[in-house]
């Protein structure tokens, strides 16, 4: 019998510690598969944020460095400028990338640093237990918007990919989702394209991934597909914004 | 001996940093530090180094972490409010045990403050580097030559102990011109890319560089942090034996002792020379390493021989004064001569304070 699918060799032989329905494991799987396809498992460097992926290093085989909350793009700037031959993925949550680290995110993109940012947009602060994120949808209930996010009090959710796409230097900016098999395959193609642009052209790219956090959304994991299609994609449209 | 050249402090230090092997600088313009950033903007390019004008001091200091993880000797410099923004990364450097060098060209006042020299950042870097209570080596030079001597060896020490090294300069030292001996280039070998905290060139086995030492012999993070930070503290304690630097000036027959560091100490030397002409036996102990503080020469001051100690410091409230007081025999009278906000220590006031101690002669 032919093997048509197997666990990526770039993943460690352990289970992730993520909640049922969480998208981080799927995102890691895609990055692991791509790293094997591009033969960069022992070259790729993973820059982690503060959030649910802070302690992700045991789940995969990539060299990893940690950063303070929001600072991964600055940390990666120092690393990549001094070590230009290592491909780098900066993996951030929406709070890390679009709130506390907005300055570092925008300026690394504006400089066109030669790394790939993958931003997991799950519209909530996951690690700290479900507070409002810069991406929390209008009306969405979180522990810090108990009556639902109000635009009068907290303004509007930030579309980070659109912010990055209006800059000159980024080569490829896209928003993808991980809520269906088809979308997962499209997200994989996008991350792979971004990494190839980094390796071949030294280009900065930004891949925003719509992710699920059913624990903090207060829904059953079986309802993720419907929730994302009904609530998330209308505000965060999918597709390439640049490149 | 090489012929000495006239250099401004900020620029002499920058050139010496480069010759010590520094190949990465990230900075943000702030007076009186800006000449360092401007100098290295063109000079690093000449030696294939990396210069980045960062978007903030937050980012500038964070970039040091990445450069250090890449095995590169990295530097940033700041002043005043910029130091506040850098403290997050100072904590990460100390906790991750990543070598890097940080220069604070101190300016007057808190908050926005002003642009003249001061010593008010003393506590902020000698007591703890950012949150979490960890330490780094801290130096307070008082001449351009000494500033260069310290930065020339700073990365050797940073790498030996895997620690951030902090240099407290100030506006006057940064901008004054003095004759210096610009040192030769150090040659670094490739083995540095195999150091334990370095993610090496091209490819490598998996390395995980954490800014917090979670790994250890125990099963919980708390136990491992307790274990690892205890080990860090053993290193800090050892510095008290191995890394203490200080100068004793006219101490042989001294009855009165001025204790100061950096610019305050330098100004005090003029007062000492004037007082000596009047027949008053004054000397000085000048700490050069501020952490570790030279405790032994302070402990050794003999109440039978020393009639008074004057701490001269450019900080109000006093900071360094209390560290000195804690080390001095309680039977020795101790006073402080303080200025701040860019108001430098004054020679005549220092003389007057010692004269009063000596009975108003």
Image (cartoon, coloured by chain):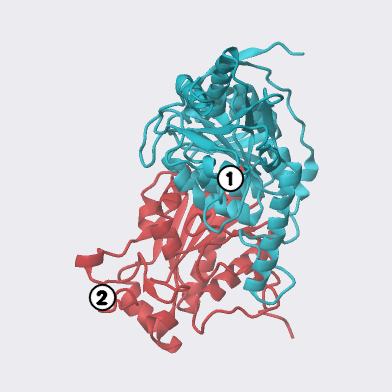
Chain colours: A red, B cyan
Q: Quadrant of residue A136?
A: bottom left
Q: Which residue is tagged 1?
A: B64
- Residue B171 seen by the camera: yes
For residue B340, side relative to residue B237 (left or right) = left
Q: Residues within 10 Å of mark 1 (few under 14, many from 20)?
A: many
Q: Which residue is tagged 2?
A: A139
- Residue B46 seen by the camera: no
For mark 1, give the secondary structure.
Answer: helix
Give the percent coordinates (x, y) of residue B203.
73, 53
Give the percent coordinates (x, y) of residue B173.
53, 25
Query: What is the number of callouts on the image?
Result: 2
Q: Nearer the viewer, residue A201 or B116?
A: B116
- Could you tell me how far apart the alpha carbons at marks 2 and 1 are, in whole angstroms? 41 Å
Question: What's the chain of the residue with tag 1?
Answer: B
* Residue drawn at x 76%, y 43% as measured from the top left: B242
Question: What's the chain of the residue with tag 2?
Answer: A
For mark 2, give the secondary structure.
Answer: loop
Give the label, 2 or 1, closer to the camera. 1
* Residue drawn at x 45%, y 73% as measured from the top left: A128
Question: From what the image shows, is residue B197 above or below residue B243?
Answer: below
* Residue drawn at x 51%, y 53% as measured from the top left: B88
């Amino acid at each position: 019998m032919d093997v048509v699918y197997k666990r990526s060799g770039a993943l460690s032989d352990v289970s992730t510690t993520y909640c049922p329905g969480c998208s981080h494991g799927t995102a890691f799987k895609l990055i692991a598969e791509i790293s094997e396809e591009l033969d960069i498992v022992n070259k790729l460097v993973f820059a982690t944020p503060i959030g649910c992926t802070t302690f992700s290093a045991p789940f995969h085989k990539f060299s990893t460095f940690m950063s303070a909350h929001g600072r991964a793009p600055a940390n990666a700037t120092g690393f990549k400028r001094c070590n230009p031959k290592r491909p780098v993925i900066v993996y951030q949550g929406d709070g890390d990338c679009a709130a506390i680290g907005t300055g570092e995110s925008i300026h690394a993109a504006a400089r066109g640093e030669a790394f790939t940012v993958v931003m997991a947009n799950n519209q909530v602060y996951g690690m700290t237990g479900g507070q409002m994120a810069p991406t929390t949808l209008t009306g969405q209930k979180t522990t810090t918007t108990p009556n639902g996010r109000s635009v009068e009090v907290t303004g509007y959710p930030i579309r980070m990919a659109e912010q990055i796409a209006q800059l000159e230097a980024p080569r490829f900016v896209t928003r993808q989702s991980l809520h269906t098999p088809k979308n997962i395959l499209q997200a994989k193609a996008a991350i792979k394209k971004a990494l190839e642009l980094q390796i071949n052209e030294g280009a900065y790219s930004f891949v925003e991934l719509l992710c699920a956090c059913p624990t903090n959304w207060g829904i059953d994991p079986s309802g993720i597909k419907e929730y994302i299609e009904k609530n998330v994609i209308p505000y965060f449209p999918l597709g390439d914004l640049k490149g | 001996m090489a012929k000495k050249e006239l250099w401004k402090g900020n620029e002499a230090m920058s050139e010496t940093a480069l010759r010590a092997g520094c190949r990465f600088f990230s900075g943000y313009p702030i007076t009186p530090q800006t000449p360092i950033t401007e100098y290295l903007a063109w000079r690093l390019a000449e030696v294939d180094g990396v210069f980045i004008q960062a978007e903030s001091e937050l980012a500038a200091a964070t970039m040091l972490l990445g450069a250090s993880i890449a095995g590169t000797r990295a530097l940033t410099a700041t002043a005043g409010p910029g130091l506040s923004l850098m403290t997050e990364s100072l904590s990460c450097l100390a906790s991750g045990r990543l070598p890097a060098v940080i220069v604070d060209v101190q300016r007057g006042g808190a908050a926005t403050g002003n642009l003249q020299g001061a010593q008010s950042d003393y506590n902020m870097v000698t007591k703890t580097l950012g949150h979490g209570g960890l330490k780094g080596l801290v130096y307070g030079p008082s001449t351009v030559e000494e500033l260069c001597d310290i930065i020339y060896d700073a990365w050797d020490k940073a790498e030996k102990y895997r620690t951030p090294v902090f240099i407290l300069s100030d506006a006057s030292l940064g901008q004054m011109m003095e004759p210096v001996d610009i040192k030769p280039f150090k040659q670094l070998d490739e083995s540095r890319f195999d150091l334990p905290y370095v993610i090496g060139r091209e490819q490598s086995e998996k390395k995980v560089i954490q800014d917090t030492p979670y790994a250890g012999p125990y099963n919980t993070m708390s136990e491992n942090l307790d274990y690892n930070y205890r080990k860090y503290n053993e290193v800090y304690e050892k510095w008290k034996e191995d890394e203490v630097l200080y100068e004793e000036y006219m101490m042989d027959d001294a009855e009165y002792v001025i204790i100061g560091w950096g610019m305050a100490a330098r100004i005090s030397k003029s007062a000492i020379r004037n007082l000596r002409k009047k027949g008053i036996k004054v000397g000085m102990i000048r700490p050069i390493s501020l952490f570790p503080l030279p405790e032994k020469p302070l402990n050794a001051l003999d109440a039978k021989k020393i009639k008074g100690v004057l701490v001269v410091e450019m900080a109000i409230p006093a900071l360094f004064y209390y560290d000195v007081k804690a080390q001095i025999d309680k039977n020795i009278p101790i006073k402080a001569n303080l200025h701040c906000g860019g108001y430098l220590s004054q020679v005549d006031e220092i003389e007057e304070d010692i004269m009063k101690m000596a009975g108003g002669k």
